[in-house]
Amino acid sequence: MSVSAVKNAPLSSVLNTFSQPGFKKWKGRSPLNVINPFENLQLRQRMPKCLIVGFAKCGTYALKSFLSLHPNLICAENETQFFSRFYFKGFAWYKRQMPFSSEHQITVEKTPSYAESKLALQRIHAFNSSIKLIVIVRDPVTRLQSSYAHFLARNKDPKLNFTFREWCGDNESIIHKIDYYSHLVNIYGLFDRDQVLVLSEEDLEADPFGVMQQVARFVGLKTAFTKDVFVFNSRKGFYCINTNNSKYKDVTTHIKTDPITGCLKKSKGRSHPNVDKSFLRHLASIALPHNENLFHIINKRFPWTTVEYFETMNS
Ligand code: A3P
C-alpha cells in the first residue's frame, strides 16, 4: 500500500492491510516507523481482549469474518492455537501473531479448540482472568454432518473412506463429539458468567446482523452496523456481505470473501452428504441429555432437532 493510498483509505482497511500475512515481516516493528501516516493512532500489535474459543464447524469463521466489519474490532488472521498447542512459543510469539491495531480497537483471536481443552482454558485464565470469551454452538447432529462433510472434502487417503456411521465411531466417541455441556462446565468454573457469551450457529445463519449487535454489546461497543450490511444470497443459501453497499464493498478485499458476491469461501456452507435417517435419530437420542444439560447451564434453549423430528422422516 503506497503512502497516498494509506492516507486516502478508510482506517479499517489500513489496519487490516497491516494484519495481512505480507506484513508479518514487520515482526513487531511498528509499520509507522516506515510509513508514519497516522502518528496519533499508535498502531501496534496488541494482545486479544476477546477470544472465540469454540466450537469447530459451528460458524466460527463466519462469526470472526463478520466481526471484522466493525471498525473497533480487529481479528487475528489465523487460528494461533497458542493456549492449546503452541504455548511453549511464549507470549512474545503470541503477540506477533496479532494484527496491528489502534488504541480504539479490540483485538479478537479465534481458536475453536480452546473450549475443548481444560488446560488451554486454565492458561487463558492465567493470562487474563477478565478476558471475554465467545462460544458458538450448533445442533450437535448437524455439526457431526458438517464435520463429516469437512472430513470427506479433505481426505485424500482412499483407505480412510469411512461411511458417516463408521466415521462417528462408537457411542463414547459420539458423546465426545456432541457434548458441549462438559466444556461449558469447565469454562464457567473459571470465568464469570458475564465474561462468556454463548451464541448459536442457527442464529448466526438466520440473523447475522442481530448476532453482530449482540457481540458488540457484549464487548462494550456500540453497534456500527446498518441492517443492510448483509444480504441473503440464494445461490449460496447464506447471508453474505452486501457488496452493493459502498460502505462494505472495500472491506471484502481483506475479509476473505468473494469480492463480487461478498460470500464466504466454498468450504463454509458446504452441502452435507445424504446419511441414514435412522442413524441421525440415534444420534439425536444420544445428544438429548447433553443438550438438556447445556440449556440448563447456559439458561437458554435452542430449537435443535429431536428424536421425534427424525421419526417423521422416511429413512
Ligand atoms: P457447513 O459448511 O457444514 O454448512 P466453521 O467456520 O466453524 O468451520 O463453521 C462452518 C459453518 O459455518 C458452515 O458449516 C455454515 O453452516 C456456517 N455458517 C454460518 N453462517 C454462514 C455464512 N454466512 N456463510 C457461510 N457459512 C456460514
Image (tube, rainbow, N blue to C red):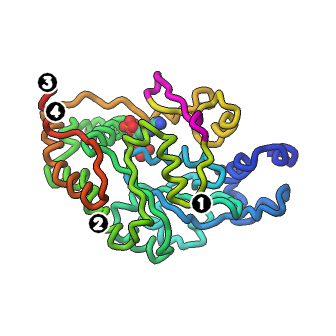
Q: Quadrant of residue 184?
A: bottom left
What amino acid is at disc 4? Phe
Q: Residues within 10 Å of mark 1 (few under 14, many from 20)?
A: many
Q: Is residue 17 left or right of residue 132?
A: right
Q: Which residue is mark 3?
A: 314
Sequence-wise, which precedes: disc 1 or disc 4? 1
Q: Where does label 1 land, which residue?
A: 107
Left or right for 23, reference 290 = right
Residue wearing tag 4: 310
Kind of residue sitting beneath label 3: Asn
Q: Marks 1 and 2, how far apart in space?
A: 26 Å
**In the image, what residue occupies the spot 54% across and 44% down?**
66
Q: Amino acid at mark 2?
A: Val
- Report which residue position mark 2 lands on: 185
User: What's the CA distance linking mark 4 and mark 2?
Assistant: 29 Å
* Quarter of the image where the N terminus is located: top right
Task: Kindly report the distance in space between the C-alpha atoms of the residues bearing marks 3 and 2.
Answer: 37 Å
Front residue (pair 172, 153):
172
Image quadrant occupied by the C terminus: top left
Q: How far apart are the two marked residues, 3 and 1, measured between alpha carbons? A: 48 Å
Q: Which mark is residue 176?
A: none
- Disc 3 crowd rating (10 Å Cα; few below 14, some 14-19, many 20+) is few
Q: Residue at x 68, y 49 (%)?
A: 16
Where residue 27 appears, as percent x and y from the top left, is 69, 63
